[in-house]
Image: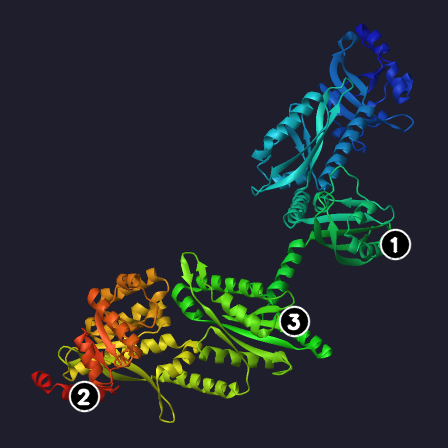
């Protein structure tokens, strides 16, 4: 054996790692005890042997190196130094050992060149490195296969590893070493920073939800969970964590919360109570709305007994019977019911509608869930609708439907008991002018007062109803001598004829009443109403403000009434009325000064009806205003035609019914008639009866002033038969008085008539009014009126009513000299 390097023998002998000294050819000159021990060869076997051939150098993968390829062989044969070359060697027993070998040239005794070969067993280190590499490979493989974003964070909060999913999500702009907060949404960074910094400070793991930025700039919600890796002393070496995409869950949760909030708000807004009942345990749960509905405080326990005690006594047995069907364990199904409760807090009665349905969970347990809705307002509305459908909404009296129902019931009783009854059909006189003049608001107030007065005039068992408009019916079951139909009718006439005070207005109306008797006039309500209606029209024709019993002879008059109404409607639509003109003479000059237009209705048989024969029918049919408009238009047109025919601008007078005068449009259509025809307003005179001006004097004065402001003259017709006072007459803006012909015709043989005529003439002079005497049929009467200051005269003494053409001829004949002048 070659001697070792003497100065270092002791070191080599005691070294735990193999040390060889080789000559330049690679043969072993020295092997220390550690080499002998590790490789299994004796010193003798090592001595002089080629180290490469003896221990067979191998590559790291275990395959042997050829001598010329072995880096260690080249190093120690070339006299070069190499360090920490890891090689795999073969022991004598054929096992492998991995060594980290270093080679350095040296000189031994005698100055001979040699190579010192140092080895260190790194088998365990290599295995550990391999294990670590394998572990890292597995870690990467596992993390790259995970759907989460996996990351490793250094103790200072910088990211130093991310998996492929992380890179794919964030994109190429990701740089390792960035701060953990760089991809976090700006709005979430503060909360994320607090959570991570707290974890870094305490060394505890952390969880935080935040939005992370994707490669396309969008954001999704993630749950980040970080766990610390610590050394033995507890120092944090790194943070390992993952971020789970919870965006869908988050949005689903938001949607669920919104849905739950929507349900809650909907329940609150609709006052919908929610409840649950567990059939196996008997547990009953109410939400706040349900408690409020039943009036149960929040701190009071709810159970079935409490629930059933709140039910209205009349509904309790039914509800309990229904509920117990579903309290039996195993019961399923769906139900709904309505019932009343007496609210626990205040005893108020409320109507509830309850729906319920069974739900069975995966373990087979059954519970019922349902809703409670307070439907009290709906029930009250239904009651109001039922009431409204049977009651007149204005007066509250039974309407036609309920009236027929009541009366049919009374008739059935009367038939069984062979008793009698009466039916009163009531129509208000002059009600339409009230509506036309003051509007439907005032008319409605009148109808309400009429309904109240009718109820006060009748017994509790009598039935008062409104058929519609101003028509009412009173049914009298089993009338007696004290409360007979005539007595009731007289009482109604008296009460309904009293003034009606509506605001500042005082209105005067009266009823016309027709009476039919059961069973004499009919066996059913339709027949009784028809007969009473016919009798009512007889009362109107008799002068209103009275009653009449039905008589079969009335039917003929009713047919005539209907025929006349149809003729009136035709005449209105086709303009088939006729105006006749009766001359008016100037008393002083005994020459024509004007004419009064008199309305006539031509009939199919050639007859001419005067207003007294058809105006009551026209009034009942609502045709008065249209007829009055036609009269004004035709009179103005005719006046202009006369002017074109050469007649002077004489006055022409038209009669105005009270209904027309009270119509709001009356003044307007007068003005329109003048404008359309071109007639001078000062040539037109309207004639009003006293009854037209007696009601609502203030409104009358206002209307008359407007009429006179246009230039139209106003005369008070039939003066003397009414009740006008001198004070009232002096306040009216009128131009003329017409003495009623009933006084004029009796001047020569009736002292009272003569006094009245003298009084009117005196009033005219005092009030500076023109006075017209009408109905003059003799020269004596004309002379009397002329002698007492009468201004104008009219009557058959001069001429009867004439057609328009006849009037022209008469006018020329009456004053030939004046005609020649024009």
| 728 sits to left or right of 384 | left
In percent of width and height, residue 382 lies at 64, 61
| Disc marking residue 406 | 3
Question: In front of the other: label 2 or label 3?
Answer: 2
As displayed, is residue 433 above or below residue 342? below
Specify which label sits upstream in the sequence, 2 or 3: 3
Residue at x 65%, y 57% (from the top left corner): 380
Residue matched to label 2? 810
Q: Nearer the viewer, residue 329 or 546?
A: 546
The answer to the question of whether label 1 and label 3 lie on touching residues, with beta carbons closer than 8 A, is: no
Which one is in front, 812 or 134? Answer: 812
Sequence-earlier tag: 1 or 3: 1
Give the SS element for disc 3: helix
Residue 118 x/y as whole percent: 79, 17
Looking at the image, the residue that sits furthest to the bottom is: 605
Q: Which residue occupies the foreground of this view, 206 or 684?
A: 684
Q: Circle 1: is it few (<14), some (14-19), or many (20+) Cα within 10 Å? A: some
Residue under label 1, please give it: 330
Asked if residue 311 shows in the view, the reply is yes
State the separation of the CA atoms marked 1 and 3: 52 Å
Q: Earlier in the sequence, mark 2 or mark 1?
A: 1
Image quadrant of residue 578?
bottom left
Q: Is residue 402 left or right of residue 707?
A: right
Q: Name the residue rendered at 53%, 68% in the picture.
A: 492
- Residue 632 can be seen, yes or no: no
Assess disc 3: are there few (<14), some (14-19) or many (≥20) residues with their C-alpha within 10 Å of its C-alpha.
some
Label 1 residue SS: loop
Q: Quadrant of the N terminus?
A: top right
For the C terminus, give its image quadrant.
Answer: bottom left
Relative depth, front residue between 703 and 90 = 703
Quadrant of the image occupied by residue 128? top right
Residue 369 in the image: above or below residue 418: above
């Amino acid at each position: 054996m070659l001697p070792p390097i003497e100065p270092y023998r002791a070191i080599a002998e005691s070294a735990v790692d193999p040390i060889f000294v080789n000559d330049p050819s690679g043969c072993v000159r020295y092997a220390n005890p550690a080499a002998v021990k590790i490789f299994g060869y004796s010193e003798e076997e090592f001595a002089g042997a080629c180290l490469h051939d003896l221990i067979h150098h191998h590559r790291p993968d275990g395959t042997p190196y050829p001598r010329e390829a072995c880096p260690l062989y080249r190093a120690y044969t070339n006299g070069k130094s190499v360090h920490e070359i890891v090689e795999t060697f073969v022991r004598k027993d054929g096992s492998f050992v991995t060594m980290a070998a270093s080679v350095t040239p040296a000189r031994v005794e005698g100055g001979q060149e040699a190579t010192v070969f140092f080895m260190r067993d790194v088998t365990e280190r290599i295995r550990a490195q391999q294990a670590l590499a394998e572990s890292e490979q597995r870690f990467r493989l596992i993390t790259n296969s995970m759907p989460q974003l996996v990351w490793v964070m250094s103790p200072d909060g910088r990211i130093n590893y991310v998996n492929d999913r992380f890179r794919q999500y964030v994109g190429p702009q990701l740089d390792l070493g960035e701060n953990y907060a760089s991809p976090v949404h700006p709005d979430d960074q503060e909360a994320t920073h607090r959570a991570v910094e707290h974890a870094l400070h305490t060394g505890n793991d952390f969880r935080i939800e935040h939005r992370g930025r994707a490669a396309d700039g969008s954001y999704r919600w993630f749950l980040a969970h970080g766990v610390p890796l610590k050394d033995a002393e507890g120092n944090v070496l790194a943070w390992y964590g993952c971020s789970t995409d919870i965006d869908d869950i988050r949005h689903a949760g938001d949607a669920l919360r919104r849905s739950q909030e929507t349900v809650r708000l909907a329940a609150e807004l609709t006052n919908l109570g929610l409840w649950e009942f567990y059939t196996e345990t008997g547990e009953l749960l109410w939400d706040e709305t349900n408690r409020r509905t039943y009036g149960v405080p929040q701190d009071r326990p709810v159970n079935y007994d409490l629930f059933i005690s709140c039910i209205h006594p009349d509904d309790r047995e039914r509800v309990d019977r229904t509920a117990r069907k579903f309290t039996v364990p195993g019961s399923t199904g769906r139900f709904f019911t309505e019932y009343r409760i007496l609210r626990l807090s205040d005893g108020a009665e409320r109507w509830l509608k309850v729906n319920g349905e069974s739900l069975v969970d995966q373990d087979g347990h059954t519970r019922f869930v349902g809703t409670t809705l307070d439907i009290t307002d709906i029930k009250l509305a239904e009651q109001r609708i039922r009431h409204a459908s049977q009651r007149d909404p204005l007066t509250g009296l039974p309407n036609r439907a309920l009236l027929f129902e009541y009366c049919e019931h009374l008739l059935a009783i009367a038939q069984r008991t062979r008793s009698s009854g009466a039916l009163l059909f009531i129509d208000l006189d002059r009600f339409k002018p009230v509506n036309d003049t003051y509007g439907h608001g005032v008319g409605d107030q009148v109808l309400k007062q009429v309904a109240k007065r009718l109820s006060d005039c009748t017994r509790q068992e009598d039935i008062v109803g409104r058929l519609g408009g101003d028509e009412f019916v009173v049914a009298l079951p089993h009338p007696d001598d004290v409360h007979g139909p005539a007595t009731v009718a007289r009482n109604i006439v008296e009460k309904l004829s009293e003034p009606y005070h509506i605001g500042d207005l005082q209105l005067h109306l009266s009823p016309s009443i027709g009476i039919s008797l059961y069973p004499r006039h009919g066996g059913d309500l339709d027949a009784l109403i028809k007969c009473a209606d016919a009798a009512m029209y007889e009362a109107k024709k008799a002068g209103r403000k009275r009653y009449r019993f039905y008589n079969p002879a009335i039917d003929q008059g009713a047919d005539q009434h209907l025929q006349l109404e149809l003729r009136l409607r035709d005449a209105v639509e086709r303009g088939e009325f006729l105006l006749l003109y009766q001359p008016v003479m100037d008393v002083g000059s005994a020459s024509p000064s004007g004419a009064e237009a008199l309305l006539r209705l031509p009939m199919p048989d050639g007859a001419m009806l005067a207003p007294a024969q058809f105006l009551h029918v026209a009034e009942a049919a609502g045709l008065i205003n249209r007829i009055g408009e036609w009269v004004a238009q035709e009179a103005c047109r005719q006046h202009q035609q006369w002017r074109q025919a050469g007649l002077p601008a004489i006055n022409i007078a038209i009669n105005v019914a009270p209904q027309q005068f009270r119509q709001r449009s009356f003044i307007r259509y007068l003005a329109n008639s003048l404008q359309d025809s071109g007639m001078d307003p000062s040539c037109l005179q309207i004639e009003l009866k006293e009854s037209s001006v007696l009601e609502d004097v203030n409104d009358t004065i206002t209307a008359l002033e407007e009429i006179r402001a246009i230039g139209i003259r106003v005369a008070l017709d039939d003066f003397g038969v009414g009740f006008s006072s001198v004070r009232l007459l002096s306040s009216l803006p009128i131009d003329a008085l017409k003495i009623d012909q009933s006084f004029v015709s009796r001047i020569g043989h009736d002292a009272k008539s003569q006094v009245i005529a003298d009084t009117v003439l005196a009033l005219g002079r005092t009030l500076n009014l023109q006075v017209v005497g009408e109905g003059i049929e003799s020269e004596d009467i004309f002379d009397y009126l002329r002698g007492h200051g009468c201004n104008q005269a009219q009557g058959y003494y001069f001429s009867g009513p004439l057609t328009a053409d006849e009037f022209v001829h008469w006018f020329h004949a009456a004053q030939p000299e004046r005609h020649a002048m024009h």
